[in-house]
Amino acid sequence: MSTMSTFTSWPPDLTLEQLDQLTLLATTYALSHSLLYLPPYSPEKQPPPAPESAIHAPFSLLPTPIPRQLFAQALSLQRAYNTLYARIALDTAFLDQVMGSGGISDIDDFTGALWSAWKRLRDEGVPPPLHLGLFRSDYLLHQPTTNDPVSLKQVEFNTISASFGALSQQVAGMHRYLVESTEYFGISPLLASDNLPLNDTVKGLAEGLEEAHRAYGISNAHVLFVVQPNERNIFDQRLLEYQLFQSHGIRVTRQTFAELGTTASISPSRALLVAPISSGLNGTPVEISVVYYRAGYTPVDYASPADYATRALLESSHAVQCPSLALQLAGGKKVQEVLTRPGVLERFLSPSEGAALVRNSWVRLWGLDKGDGAGADEAVREANELVIKPQREGGGNNIYRDKIPSFVAQLPQRERPAWVAMELIRPPREVGAHLLRSGSERVHTRVVSELGVFGWALFGEGRELKEEQAGWLVRTKAEDVDEGGVAVGFSVLDSVLLVE
Ligand code: ADP
Ligand code: MG
């Protein structure tokens, strides 16, 4: 079957009885395999101190067709992206120029706070840390008209708190189980296990953390997970924690910024020490090898200036930072735009390292600042095929299509440089899916799917870069929804069905 007809005929018809049976098997599998969230809690009522129940994460009942060759391309691009972002994070002059004072930091408070914290550490002569990136590069399939070939275009590159590695592995396992146990009632010869790629994300991401832990060199040190208070996506994090413990013997300490404000300290030899939250537990502080941030990507995570001070304190130690402030800034959308300008990517990546393939995975981006990124104003005036984005992560921040001109018109001139405009990627139309969300009716709707590829990179000044590709995820959303976050309720977890 050709790719085109697969897309337009997906998913094949299922009877109501078949759908109900698949739903039963899928939800039971999900509940049995940690494909879970904590349930929503009401703001009036604090969640219980220890969880009492969980709900299955939202997911799609069938895997999503992705052309085999584009999937392979996305996986192989990851090594080049790992290298690219490692080099950007080490290029202080470049980051200062794009994100620092005189650049975005003067306009965007959040970027300014992160950059200032980093600058202060440098001014104080604190040696730079080892950097670990647990990355996710996100793509959409691009097919402007039905006559065009389908290609792969990058949405964004995440350098902090990239989530759903563990849950995406569980979804892939669930779809494999449904294929192997039911063959989806024979509705399509494509639904065969050979067409479902394996997804070892938990192992891959834990290997990155383990490599960083080993580089730190003290085997009984702990990895610190910096987490949000009242996080609901804890199983995605805990599966990584269990992998670190069970496969590598590495212990994990989980704390929030607020907790670390009182528990974290730096020893004279610059070891990061973290005491248990409750002094009733064995009160001896533990040494931290790697700080893994699953919080800190949004201003909401810094409830007060004290939390920025805590972030800086953690980075003033010699624990590996995943990510460092520099690496977080490297993941900024402004950096993504500046890279697309002539010759900029090519300063970081040579032709033999895949610079052309990386560039080819991009659509057009412009700065909204006057004078740079020629054509931005014109593009904004005819904004039907554009999205504009501020320097934020985590979903819900972008402005789309016809809302752009009036938004830009009221945007104070001085704030414009903190926004980038991006050509809209145009995924194939008419792909359908059955979406399941705990507590809601099953929904059959037209969808758009976003492929994410995970990778890790461990690097530092004067040290050889180590990096690997580390699995993938698919998030699927209803076609008429612009944004894509799963945690914020826009999309569901999904997996790949390879098609020709
Ligand atoms: P965030 O950092 O908030 O996740 P993204 O850049 O990933 O911001 O954008 C959020 C969502 O908006 C994406 O997951 C995608 O679904 C959609 N989106 C972003 N950029 C584009 C684009 N150029 N074309 C089409 N959809 C896009
Ligand atoms: Mg995103």
Image (cartoon, grey):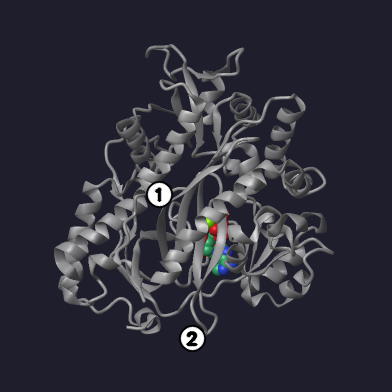
Near mark 1 (Cα within 10 A), the count class, few <14, some 14-19 or many ≥20, is many
- Provide the secondary structure element on which disc 2 rests: loop
As displayed, is residue 193 above or below residue 88? below
Percent of width and height locating residue 161: 50, 44
As displayed, is residue 329 above or below residue 414? above
Label 2 sits on residue: 146
Q: Nearer the viewer, residue 438 or 342?
A: 342
Label 1 sits on residue: 165
Q: Residue furthest front?
A: 352
Residue 270: name its quadrant: top right
Amino acid bearing label 1: Gly
Near mark 2 (Cα within 10 A), the count class, few <14, some 14-19 or many ≥20, is few
Residue 438: name its quadrant: bottom left
- Provide the secondary structure element on which disc 1 rests: helix
As drawn, is 224 to the left or to the right of 31? right
As displayed, is residue 60 above or below residue 325? below
Percent of width and height locating residue 160: 54, 44
As displayed, is residue 257 above or below residue 190? above
Residue 343: name its quadrant: bottom right
- First reached walking from the N terminus: tag 1 or tag 2: 2
Q: Residue 206: which disc? A: none
Percent of width and height locating residue 309: 65, 27
Give the CA separation, mark 1 to mark 2: 32 Å
Percent of width and height locating residue 36: 31, 47
Amino acid bearing label 2: Thr
